[in-house]
Amino acid sequence: MTPTFTIGGDLKVNRLGFGAMRVTGPGVWGPPANPTEARAVLRRALELGVDFIDTADSYGPEVSEQLIGDTLFPYPPGLVIATKGGLTRGGPGQWSPNGRPEHLRKAIEGSLKRLRLDRIDLYQLHRIDPKVPLHESLGALAALQREGKIRHIGVSNFSVGELRQARELVPIASVQNRYSLVDRQSEDVLDECTRLGLAFIPWFPLGAGDLSSGKAIELVASRRGVTSHQLAIAWLLQRADNLLPIPGTSSVKHLEENMASAELTLLPEDLRVLDGKR
């Protein structure tokens, strides 16, 4: 049974969600190599109990959102689709911040259309634009929230200080930062979110798939009879009650393996090895 968390006080979701970045082409650019499999992944995710999908207008760009809307609409009751805005694309692997209010408004309107929604349950500022004051970017999201187009506001790639600054401007429901078993640089942000009761959504929750170099991971995974990816997801689920992993994949087989991680309970001796405390 997947544990749950309530985002923003009113969006109860299973804590093992799905990140929809990988249902696009190489470099998160263009359509997926196998559109049929990508659609099958999205449908299977819902069958396996996923009720929280994370995407962004920059994935493709626009490809991930369009695929979600075309494949899953009409949405089942309780499905939460979170998306993000504030990054533009120049090509495969190229990302540029744009936090101008007029851009964010246009981005949200596009996301609503592609996702076939009247309101986005969780809309996240993808990254701070150093050329735009934070109060202007978040002010634009607050205005759209007042218009009923956003339910909750989240932020992504924020430090503790930036989160505190953001919370002085608007209510923040979540933070999405890079975090995994092998990359814990946002540990202080996770701790702050835990203290505040905010959702923490780790991107690259599997360390971008690079878990092979960790001997401790290999040791525990072998001992428990699971894959390193399953171990990494289980570790995240046990790390904090407000942590919502969103592993992504373009393969139904890998999706099913990832979702099985919710049934794995790590033992104290497993955690000691993974944390280097043998």
Image (cartoon, helix red, strand yellow):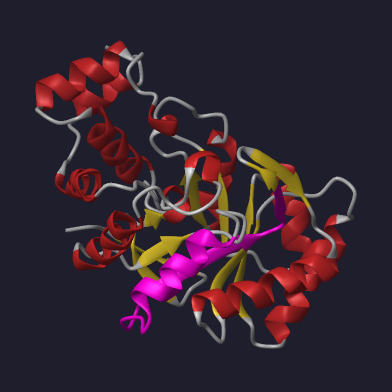
Relative placement, left or right, of 176 versus 105 is: left
Whether 45 is among the magenta residues is no
Residue 200 pos. (x, y %): 50, 51
Look at 75% across and 58% down and name the residue there: 166
Residue 155 against residue 182 in the figure, above or below: below
Residue 275 against residue 60 in the figure, above or below: above
Relative placement, left or right, of 73 versus 93 is: left
Residue 26 against residue 51 in the figure, above or below: above
Q: Nearer the viewer, residue 38 or 223?
A: 38
- Segment colored magenta: 62-89
Relative placement, left or right, of 30 versus 231 is: right
Residue 157 pos. (x, y %): 64, 44
The quadrant the C terminus occupies is top left
Residue 182 pos. (x, y %): 43, 25
Q: Nearer the viewer, residue 103 or 2?
A: 103
Q: Nearer the viewer, residue 194 or 214?
A: 214
Look at 50% across and 82% down and name the residue there: 116
Residue 220 pos. (x, y %): 19, 21
The quadrant the N terminus occupies is bottom left
State whether residue 90 appears in this view: yes
Look at 48% across and 54% down and name the residue there: 31
Look at 56% across and 54% down and name the residue there: 60
Residue 94 against residue 201 in the figure, above or below: above
State whether residue 169 appears in this view: no
Relative placement, left or right, of 196 versus 166 is: left
Q: Nearer the viewer, residue 226 or 186?
A: 226
Name the image quarter holding residue 234.
top left
